[in-house]
Image: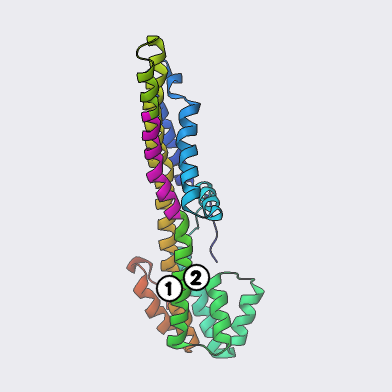
Amino acid sequence: MIKRVFSIWTLSGILAGIGLFSTAILISTKNYMIFLSLSSLIMVLGGTFAATMISYHARYVILALKSLVAIIMPYHLSPKQLNRDALDVIEWSKINNKSGFIAVENIINEKKITDPLIVYSKDLISTGVKSEKLRFMLEDLIECMLERQMVEANILQTMAGMAPAFGMVGTLIGLIIMLDNMGGDISSVGPGLALALLTTLYGVVFAQLMFKPAAEKIRQTVEILRHRNIILMESLVLLSEGKASFEIQDHINRFISPKNWIDLSQPSE
């Protein structure tokens, strides 16, 4: 019932951040190549990746890195989509009260719905679980799903903290190189000083423009998913109790902004 949709605004934010940063450099100096350093890049990203692999299991780190790309394809969860999901359950409640839950099961199977919450609810209701027991089990499922989905955000948040730290490590290394050459050829001081400053710059840029925003994006998406799942949970619990569609509507509207309230008395669009 939910799907990933390309987000032009997320991509625009990424391109705008990179573009503004690059433009600021280009209008400040003609020798913009001084801001490119492979050794600094390796030191920051390599150190951050190594420390993250030590801190977390490898498969979770890989998932977190994949999510850096996936943020431009977030789950589409607009108010209209939330209403459509709720209206589906309301329609199922009508079918359930008229033809029994087997008819609802057939609809879910025919539409090949794979949403974990709906599939799990279907299995529970079909075995006679309902009311508060159903709510208790669905709440556990929602919270467990939330914890699993937050792992990627937590890893990226950790990487956001590690990147500037390894930038400082690179700064120390660069200063050591610079000081070691102070008594010799003065021309060799420049590369060491450049390394010292660029690693700090890279660490801050990667943390503030990549890892931290991605972590916040994932965290916000997970919270929206949780809100949507709570609406579905309440709807499915009422469905299991055989409640009327208008009663389900009133319960659902508690979780929805007043301007998006469901009104079954109005013709659907």
Label 2 sits on what residue type?
A: Asp
Instruction: Give the residue number, with chain letter if any, for mark 1.
Output: 231
Q: Main secondary structure of the magenta part?
A: helix
Q: Residue at x 64, y 72 (%)?
A: 111
Q: Position of residue 81 (x, y in %)?
A: 48, 64
Q: Nearer the viewer, mark 2 or mark 1?
A: 1
Q: Residues within 10 Å of mark 1 (few under 14, many from 20)?
A: many
- Disc on res. 183: none
Quarter residue 255 falls in: bottom left
Q: Position of residue 5 (x, y in %)?
A: 53, 54
Q: Position of residue 129 (x, y in %)?
A: 51, 88
Q: Nearer the viewer, residue 259 or 89?
A: 89
| Cα separation between marks 2 and 1 | 9 Å
Contact? badges 2 and 1 (CB < 8 Å): yes
In the drawing, does residue 165 fall left or right of residue 37? left
**Could you say whether the residue bearing mark 2 is in a helix, strand or loop?**
helix
In the drawing, does residue 124 fall left or right of residue 168? right
Label 1 sits on what residue type?
A: Ile
Q: Is residue 166 magenta?
A: yes
Q: Residue at x 44, y 48 (%)?
A: 214
Please say if 38 is above or below 155.
Answer: above
Q: Is residue 229 magenta?
A: no
Q: Position of residue 89 (x, y in %)?
A: 51, 77
- Disc on res. 85: 2
Span highlighted in magenta in the image:
153-172
